[in-house]
Amino acid sequence: MKLSIPSSSRKAVLLFALMLGALALVGVFQSWNLMLAILNLCLISAIMALGVNLQWGYAGLFNAGIMGFAALGGLAAMLVSKAPIMGAWQAGGFGVLLGVIIWIMSGILAYLIWLRFKGRRRYWYVIIIAGAGYILSRFVLDPAILRIESFEPASSGYLGGAGLPVLLSWGVGGILAGCVAFIIGKITLGLRSDYLAIATLGISEIVIFMFKNEDWLTRGVKNVTGIPRPVPYEIDLQSTIWFQDITDSVGMNVMQASSLFVKLCYTSLFLGVLLMLLWLCERALNSPWGRMMRAIRDNETAASAMGKNVTSRHLQIFVIGSAIVGIAGAMLVTLDGQFNPSIYHPLRFTFLIWVMVVVGGSGNNFGAILGGFIVWFFWIEAETIGNMLVYIITLPLSEGSALKEHFLSTAPQLRLLIMGLVLLLFLRFSPRGLIPERISNKA
């Protein structure tokens, strides 16, 4: 019996092979260090695209607040791995804990009052309890925060973290993003799709605004640097005998070899997480749960008539997808070694991720991963491609020409133009994505 491979599978293998070939060309013609740096960011972007594909491709939820969940994952990486600042804790840590407890207790009390009473009275009771809780918490928090931010502000000025292994923060980042997504989902998932997009975008902007201004928690725009690594430091590798012996045996510079080794360590960790999540997502997609989610996506009215709780299922997948984005956000901060709230822009952490899903093929996990690789590759290499195109176009012009100098100086700004052209070409010739969703006929 002859074994036949579906054409869609052959196409997927070919596209991934071409993507790996493009990365290899970067290594050959630019540098292997740059190739591995792009590869690591492609892996993180692919994980984010996988999370968004769950929400949009499985359930049709338009989440425009991806950057907020990525930032929550980054916050978790910092809070878990950084050592606590004992002086800051002594200065105002107890006051912060007391203020947070007042917040939580007032929220629980307001919720219980909401359940206990009916009619208009409960609105007034909830407003009074929430207002009183806020005023009391600020009365406790403000002096404590002032003392924390005044403690060695140049080097610390915040509480620090828990001092735990940084790999643990990846899971914590997913849990934190999932918990926040649960709260957001309970509020917004009853809205229409366009209102849901506006609400999630607004909430993510609020999250970033808080991170930029709550110095006692994140140091604000002063950044938190020195986040521990899950891999060796280059300087440590360069001083070890066994690594020096290996580099001498292959005839490679020890500094360059240490940088490649560290990036390869990151690659193995990121690839392991991506493959694990891909396996779980594929199992979910091909299970009765996955078929139910797609049925809800295609016709909510029919699914509801069959007894399915549409809002509950939407909340479920919204939390799962946001948790995956949170894991990727923690991985990104671990790779960078710093937490900087200013880097979270909608263009990078929302728009580009959506482009990855659309280009790769929504509803297909392999398509989302491929889209993550392709879009991030072109986002990084667009400047190089733009410089090359401008150089070719201006070859007929003489050296020192004002027009040639102008074109060469504006070449880096072609990145957005090239990305727009790439997106238009993909949408024109592959409107359902490079690897579109596979519709199974299994019952």
Image (cartoon, rainbow, N blue to C red):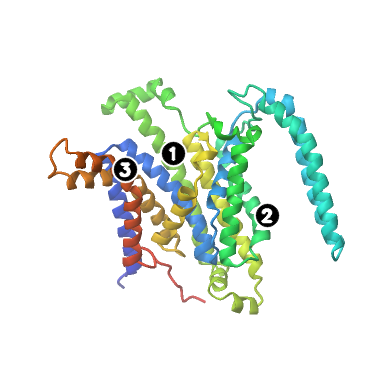
Give residue 163's quadrant in the image.
Answer: top right
Amino acid type indicated by mark 1:
Tyr
Image-based side of 189 in relation to 364, left or right: right
* Residue wearing tag 2: 183
Image-based side of 97 in relation to 288, left or right: right
The secondary structure type at the circle numbered 2 is helix
For the point 64% across and 36% down, the residue is 214
Image-based side of 157 in relation to 24, left or right: right
Q: Which mark is residue 279?
A: none
Label 2 CA crowd tier, 10 Å (few <14, some 14–19, many 20+): few
* Residue wearing tag 1: 266
Q: Is residue 10 above or below residue 160?
A: below
Gap between marks 3 and 2, in whole Å? 41 Å
Tag 3 or tag 1, which sits nearer the N-term? 1
For the point 69% across and 25% down, the residue is 88
* Residue wearing tag 3: 412
Quadrant, the N terminus? bottom left
Residue furthest out toward the front: 402
Q: Is residue 400 above or below residue 430?
A: above
Label 1 CA crowd tier, 10 Å (few <14, some 14–19, many 20+): many
Amino acid type indicated by mark 2:
Ile
